[in-house]
Image: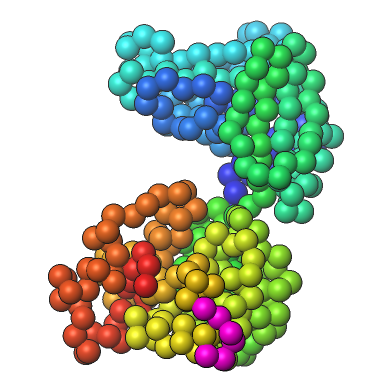
């Protein structure tokens, strides 16, 4: 699964390139509870095909009814300036459209967006650029500009702006079984996933489709990856020869998450190696996460992957996890600190070391 915004825009681009009528719906305002956040987009083709989402489904059904070929006013509707549509104004309507109690949302509908500008936008996003799409409300004219940082949707009296980022990326070092579970979950969550492992015996058994696999040395891959604030880098090999240099390279980037698997003991040993041999300090290693994951009592590779992916998503979404999810603190109270268990907590782990 790819980034949903890119999928919507790419599909809309293809419909327009085929000469099909289509509309783009953007959630521009919400009041109270709403199923989808401001900035969510959905595209609909003239035949009623839909990609993306602006609600839990009922609003999509209404848009299909109102604007597909079966609707008598379709030809008149799918042209002209953007249209404002509001759902959930009354309690009855909120219930009808499956909105939470008191929820209201407002959409901007753009009819037949320019196919060439959609192509340019998708090309920029696929090249890793963040872009802002400006829509003139008077006539639906669109222009694009480069964006440096993520931004919320804004609406003025004359213009709607929506900033789109490239896909979030995940670089995983090591192609073992745990990596397969993590990669599968990351793909599901819209990440573009790259796996790096110079060990042929691990690469040849790789079985997850949709992942880029490379045999280069991990530190070289990190350098070439040009990690930005939409990138996370996770070392999963337990091998200092593969992990350590790559992690040091990762810490010099803007990656939003840098972490390594291992027990508290192994992670502390890693930090000491970096301090003694690579001129690091406690301060320079503050961004290095380990043990990785949140505490859910996980022991199997699949459970550890859930733990890790949950932490990555929490960091991505700016969520501060509760203290009792931190294994470094939960260890003494949950009885997982015995030496015999030390080998099991390699990935059962923590918000922080």
- Residue 262, above or below 192: below
Q: Where is residue 330 in the image (x, y as percent from the top left)?
A: 22, 68
Q: Residue at x 71, y 8 (%)?
A: 76
Residue 330 in view here: yes
Residue 49 in view here: no
Answer with left or right where residue 22 lies relative to residue 171: right
Q: Is the magenta stretch mostly helix, strand or loop?
A: loop
- Residue 148, above or below 141: below
157 or 37: which is nearer to us?
157
209 or 244: which is nearer to us?
244
Q: Where is residue 345 in the image (x, y as percent from the top left)?
A: 31, 79
Magenta-span inclusion, residue 277:
yes
State which quadrant residue 256 falls in. Answer: bottom right
164 or 19: which is nearer to us?
164
State which quadrant residue 207 falls in. Answer: bottom right
**Quadrant in which the N terminus is drawn:** bottom right
**Quadrant in which the C terminus is drawn:** bottom left
Answer with left or right where residue 216 lies relative to residue 229: right
Q: Which residue is drawn at 70% across and 19% down?
A: 159
Magenta-span inclusion, residue 272:
no
Q: Position of residue 249 (x, y in %)?
A: 64, 75
93 or 312: which is nearer to us?
312
Answer with left or right where residue 196 lies relative to residue 76: left
Q: What stretch is highlighted in magenta?
A: 276-281
The colour scheme used here is: rainbow
């Amino acid at each position: 699964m790819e980034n949903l915004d890119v999928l919507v825009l790419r599909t809309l681009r293809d419909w327009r390139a085929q000469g099909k009528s289509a509309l783009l719906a953007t959630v521009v305002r919400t009041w109270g509870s709403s199923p989808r956040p401001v900035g969510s987009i959905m595209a609909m083709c003239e035949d009623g095909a839909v990609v993306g989402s602006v609600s839990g489904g009922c609003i999509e059904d209404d848009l299909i009814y109102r604007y597909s070929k079966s609707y008598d006013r379709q030809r008149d509707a799918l042209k002209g300036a953007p249209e404002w549509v509001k759902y959930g104004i009354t309690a009855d309507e909120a219930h009808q459209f499956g909105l939470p109690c008191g929820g209201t949302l407002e959409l901007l509908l753009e009819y037949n967006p320019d196919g060439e500008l959609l192509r340019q936008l998708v090309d920029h996003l696929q090249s890793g650029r963040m872009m802002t799409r400006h829509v003139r409300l008077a006539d639906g004219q669109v222009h694009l500009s480069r964006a440096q940082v993520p931004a919320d949707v804004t609406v003025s009296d004359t213009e709607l702006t929506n900033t789109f980022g490239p896909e979030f990326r995940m670089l995983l070092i090591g192609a073992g079984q745990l990596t397969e579970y993590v990669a599968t979950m990351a793909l599901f969550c819209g990440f573009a996933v790259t796996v790096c492992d110079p060990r042929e015996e691990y690469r040849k058994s790789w079985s997850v489709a949709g992942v880029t696999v490379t045999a280069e040395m991990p530190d070289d891959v990190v350098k070439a990856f040009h990690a930005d604030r939409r990138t996370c880098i996770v070392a999963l090999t337990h091998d200092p020869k593969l992990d350590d240099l790559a992690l040091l390279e990762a810490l010099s980037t803007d990656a939003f998450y840098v972490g390594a698997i291992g027990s508290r003991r192994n992670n502390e040993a890693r930090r000491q190696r970096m301090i003694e041999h690579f001129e690091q300090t406690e301060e320079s290693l503050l961004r290095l996460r380990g043990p990785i994951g949140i505490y859910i009592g996980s022991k199997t590779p699949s459970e550890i992957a859930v733990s890790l992916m949950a932490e990555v998503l929490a960091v991505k979404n700016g969520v501060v996890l509760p203290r009792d999810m931190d294994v470094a603190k939960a260890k003494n109270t949950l009885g997982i600190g015995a030496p015999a268990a030390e080998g099991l907590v390699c990935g059962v782990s923590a918000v922080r070391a």
